[in-house]
Every structure is written in C-alpha cells, then in structure tokens.
Amino acid sequence: MACITCGLCIDACNDVMEKIGKPLHLIGYMALTDETRERAGQTPKSVWKHVFRPRTVLYTVLWAGVGVALVVALFLRSPIDINVTPVRNPQYVTLSDGSIRNAYDLRLRNKQGEERWFAFSATSEATFVLSLDSDAELKVLVPANETKTVRLFVTAPADSHAAEHERTDLRLWIEDVGTEAAPGTDRVHYDTVFYGKDD
C-alpha cells in the first residue's frame, strides 16, 4: 500500500522504541533541506527555524497589518450611507405659483443594529424648500441593517436665482436623529445640482 502520510507508523515505531528503551523518532517527517544535512552528518534544523523564516515572518506581519486595517475600517465606517439620484423625467416641474420643483430618489442605508430616524436638510447659495412625498416633518424611520428609498422634493421660489438658472449647486444633508433612548450624532452629505429653467 502506498504511503498516505497518516503518521501512524511514526506512532507505532515510537511505542516500540519506548518499550525496548531505545531513542524515539527513529522515523519521522523531515524537510528536504534536512535530508541533505543528515547525509553529511550534520544535525537537522530545529522546527522553530523552519517556522520562523524571513518569508513567514514577513507574511505574518503583512496579514496582521491587513487584519488591523480591516478592524479599524470597520470601527471608523459611517453608520449611515446615502445615494442620491435626481429624477430625470421630467427634470423639473413648474408649479402653479411659478416655483420650480426637482425630485430626488434617496437610498438610505442604516448600518446600525437598531432602527433610526433620519432627518433631511439642504445647504446652498440659493433658498430652497424641502418636502417628502409621505412625511411633512422631513424625517423617515429606517429599520436596522436595511435600506429604504424615499423621494425628496426640492422647490425653488418663483423668480429666484435657482428657478431662473439652469444649474445650481445643492448639498443634501442626512442627519441621524436616532431615538429618544439613543439620540444620534452622525451626519452625512451628498452633493448634487438643482435644475431650473433652461430657456
């Protein structure tokens, strides 16, 4: 039968050598480099010298560094994530009072292990009015470890700079207001544009 490197022969040999009072490890595993040393009458290298070689030490340090970097990234990651997609069809809507309204689809991801309330706001050189299609309070509840999509409406008053110009820079803010038991402190933003009249 061919050897399957199970090591049972080594154990059996050691048992017999121990019973007859002879040195153990008459047979055993050996590195190819040690085979040449033994043929030359030299002692084989210790196991530790085979393990702690420059290459293995370097690999250990590199993998440990990767592991530490992943742990640090995990703890430093933002607990909320946002993706904003402007609604292109139509690009803007003219309301009955002459104001211009844009719509944005927001994908909110709550990376925390509990449900959280998120509030919306905007900063820009122009003046805008924000509203949600389902909640006038400009906040939405996102379950734990889930993603929720909401539609946000941004309106520029009639004859305002944003309403009369084709593009106006706009920064949307999402703030984690948390719950009464665990208020939030995190805040993220997404830069986009507001589209006004292009004629």
Image (cartoon, helix red, strand yellow):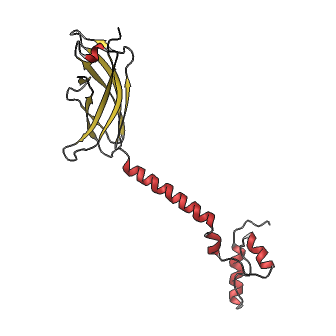
Tell me: 80 left or right of 42.
left
- Image quadrant assignment for residue 107: top left
Give the image location of residue 25, x and y in percent: 70, 81
Tell me: 160 left or right of 25.
left
Give the image location of residue 90, x and y in percent: 36, 13
Tell me: 181 left or right of 83.
left
Q: Nearer the viewer, residue 17 or 174?
A: 174
- Look at 22% across and 45% down and name the residue there: 183
- Look at 43% across and 54% down and name the residue there: 71
Quadrant of the image for the C terminus? top left
Quadrant of the image for the N terminus? bottom right
Is residue 82 depicted above or below 25 in this figure? above
Is residue 70 depicted above or below 92 in this figure? below
Is residue 79 depicted above or below 129 in this figure? below
- Look at 35% across and 23% down and name the residue there: 193
Give the image location of residue 187, x and y in percent: 29, 40
- Look at 50% across and 55% down and name the residue there: 66
- Image quadrant assignment for residue 51: bottom right
